[in-house]
Image: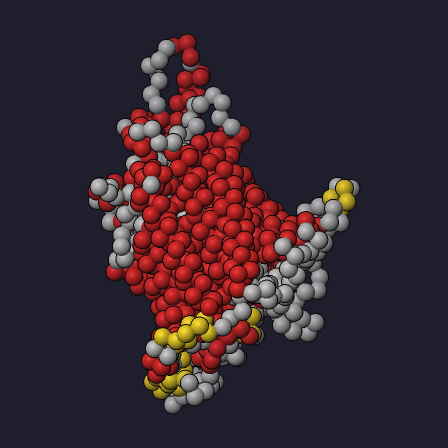
Amino acid sequence: MSTPVKQTSATPLGRPHAGVGDRFRLWWNAQSRPAQWAFGVPFILFIALVPILNIPVLTTVGTNFGAVMAQFGMIALIAIGLNVVVGQAGLLDLGYVGFYAVGAYTVALLTSPDSPWNQTGEGNWLSQDWAWLAVLPVAVCITAISGLLLGSPTLRLRGDYLAIVTLGFGEIVRLLADNLGEITGGGRGLSQVAYPQLGQTEANPGGLFSAGNVAGRINSGVWWFWLSLVLIMVVLLFVGNLERSRVGRAWVAIREDEDAAEIMGVPTFKFKLWAFTIGAAIGGLSGALYAGQVQFVTPTNFNVINSVLFLCAVVLGGQGNKLGVILGAFIIVYLPNFFLGRTDLFGIPINGNEIANYRYLFFGLALMVLMIFRPQGLLPARQKLLTYGRQLYVAARRTAKRQHGDAGTGDQHGTTGAEEVSR
Amino acid sequence: MSSLLSVGALADGSWLAVPAISFNIEALGDRFWSLTIEGLAYGSIYALVAVGYTLVYGVLRLINFAHSEIFMLGMFGQYAVLMLLGFSPSGNAYAEGAVMTIVYLGIAMIGGMLISGGAAVGLERVAYRPLRKRNAPSLVFLITAIGASFVIQEFVHFVLPALTDGELGGVNAQQPIRLVEQKEQFTIFGASVTNVTLIIIGSALVLALATDMFVNRTKFGRGIRAVAQDPTTATLMGISRERIIMLTFLIGGVLAGAAALLYTLRVPNGIIYSGGFILGIKAFCAAVLGGIGNLRGALLGGLILGVMENYGQILFGTAWRDVVAFALLILILMFRPTGILGETLGRARA
C-alpha cells in the first residue's frame, strides 16, 4: 500500500500564528488576478534576466551561468512533470529518466546524421531535414505513448511494486540505448542533433541556439533558458488547469486513498494512466530540449541515479507544489555549480571544487535531514478546495475584514467564507 | 549491417532498419548445465541479499533502498579484515593450504557480516527510527533510504580514502585479494563445478536454512513474524517492536555481509563504491519476484533470477543480462502482482 506524504492539512485561514509562508500565500491568494499579474510578470522577467545581469555572488564562476540556467530550465520541466506523477497522483516513479531518454533519443534519431532512421534521402519522409521544432511535438507524442505503454500493464501494481517496476523500466531504456548499437550508436551516442536555427550571422554561423554560440553574455545557454522558461509557463498553465479540473481532483483522491477513491466512483486506473502519460510527455519535452541543447545524446546521461536526483528535486522543493518543485530543481542544479571553481565566499576561503565533488553526499544528507524535520519539502503544498479555492480565499478575507470592522455589532456577520461560497 | 532485419520498404525503396535480436538457442542447449550451476551461484548471492529486503519490508513495509550499500560496505569490510590480517592487495591468500584458506574465509566472512550488520543497525538508528517516532508515511522512508544510500556511497567514494590514506575506497575498485584459487572439483552432466561455486552455493544454502529456521522456529523469529503480522497486537503481547526491528535489520545486514564475501569470491574486481547498486536492485527484484515480505519467496526469487538471467545472457548476449532480469520482473508482476509465493511473512503458523 502506498501511503503518500500527508500534506499539512488545514488552510491557515484566520489562524493567528500562521508562518511567513502562510501569510504570504494568504495575501497572494487574496489579490485580484490583475494584481497577481502585476507582481508576477516583473518577477518572471527578473528571473529571465538573472543569467545576463551578472549579479556578483549569484553568478557561477566555474561554469557558464547561462548553461547552468539552461540546465535548470530543463530539470525544472522534469520536476513539474514528475510532480504530476509523484506529487499529485501519488505514484512513485523511480524510472522517470527513461521518459527523458525517450524524448531525447526521438529527437536525435530523427535529426542526427548518425541515425539510421533518417536516411531516406532529400525530400522524403524520415530524411535529415526535420527541424528541431517539428520534431518536438513528435518527441512529446512518442514519449506520451511510451508512458501509456509502460503504464497500462504496470499501473495495476501498487506503491512499492510500481516503484521497482518503473526503476526497471528506466534501466531497460538506458540499456536498450546502449545495446542497440546499430540504431542508437551505442556508447558513442548520436551527435549533431538539430537545434532551432535562428539568428545566423557571419560571426555566429550556427545561430543563437547553437552550442557554438558561447561568446558574449547572451550565449546559447541563455537562449535555451529563455526557451525553457516559455515552455515551463505553458506547461504550468496546462498542469495548473488540469489540477483544478475533475482530473486533478481525481488525482488528489487517488493520492490520499486509492481504495476510497475507487469506492467513491473515481476510475482510478484511468486517471493514474492519465497522470503517467502526461508526466511522461512533459519528461519527453524536457528530453527533447536537452538533446537540442547539447546536440549529442549518449546512454550515460540517462543513468538511474538521475531519476533519483529528479525525485530529490521534487521532494526537496515540496511535492504537489509546482513552484516548490521548480525551487527544488534550481537547488539541485545550481548549488553544485555555485561551488564549482569558487575559492572564496564572502571573504572566507573555501575549496569550491571539493564541495561540488561532494554534492551527492550533501544531497543525501540534506534529504535525510529534511525528511526528519520537514518531510513536506521546502515549499509544502497546502490542501485547499481546488475548484473553489480562489473564491473561498477572497470570500474569507472579505468576511474577516468585515468582522474586524464592526466587531462591536456582535456576531450576525460571522458567516465563514465557506458558507458564503456555498450560498 | 548484417544483423539488421529490414521491415517494409519506404516510398523510394529504402529500408527502415530495426535490430534483430538473435536467439542463440544452440548455445543454451550446449551449455545448459554449466549455465544453470553458474546461475545458481549468482542466484544464491541475490537470495542472501534479498532476504534483507524482504524481512525489513515484512516488518516495516519499507523498501530499504540503502540495503545495496550495506552489501557494498560488507565487501569493503571483508577486504579491510583481510588487509588487517596482513594480506597485500593483489595478493593471494590460498598459498597456505586448505585449512588456512577455510580459516581466512571464515574470518573474512565474519568481518563482512559484522561491518554490514553493524551498518544496517546503525542506519536503522540514525535514519529510520526518527521517522518512525514521527509516524512518517512510507514515501518519506523511501526517500530517506535513497538519501542514506547516497551518503554511504559517497562516504566510501570520498571520505574513506581520506581516513585510510587511500588504502580503501576512492574512485577505483580495490585490487583483489584472492582467497580461493579457482579449481574444477568435479563435473555434472559435463558441466564443471569449481570450488568457488561450491563454496558460494554451500555457504548460501547453510545461511538460508539457518535464517529460515531462525525466523520460523525460534522465539525471536516468532517475534519477527508477529510484528510483521500486526505490530500493535504484537506490542500488546509483550514484544518489543523496536528490538524486533533492530533484529530484523541485523539479520538482513549480516546476510548481506556474507553475500558480499561470496560475491567477491566470484567477482574479485567488484569492490568499488558503486558496486552495490545494480546488485541491490536485482536482489530487490528477486525479493519482489518471490513475493516481498516472504522469506522463502526471497530465496526462491533469488535463485530463479540468477538462473534465468544467466540463460538470458546466453540467449540474447551478455549485454542483455540486466534487461532480461528487469523484463522478467515486469512480466512476472503483470501476471502475479504479489510475486510467485505471495506476501506471507506475517501469515500465522501453527
Q: Position of residue B154 (x, y in %)?
A: 59, 52
Q: Does residue A49 lie above or below A374 as drawn?
A: below
- Answer yes or no: is residue A232 visible: no
Task: Residue at 45%, 63% (x, y): give it.
Answer: B199
Q: Does residue B26 lie above or below B265 as drawn?
A: below
Q: Position of residue A144 (x, y in %)?
A: 37, 62
Along the line of sight, the residue nearer the viewer: A67 or B273: B273
Task: Tell me if B293 is positioned left or right of A300 in this view.
Answer: left
Q: Position of residue A418 (x, y in %)?
A: 33, 28
Residue at the limit of the structure toward the bottom, as seen here: B13
Q: Does residue B204 lie above or below B60 as drawn?
A: below
The total number of labels drawn is 0
Task: Residue at 41%, 62% (x, y): give it.
Answer: B201
**Which quarter of the rendered picture does the C terminus of chain B lie within?**
top left
- Answer yes or no: is residue B328 visible: yes
Residue B173 quadrant = bottom right
Along the line of sight, the residue nearer the viewer: A63 or B159: B159
Task: Tell me if A137 is positioned left or right of B335 in this view.
Answer: right
Task: Residue at 35%, 45% (x, y): give it.
Answer: B214
Task: Residue at 77%, 45% (x, y): give it.
Answer: A349
Q: Position of residue A30 (x, y in %)?
A: 45, 32
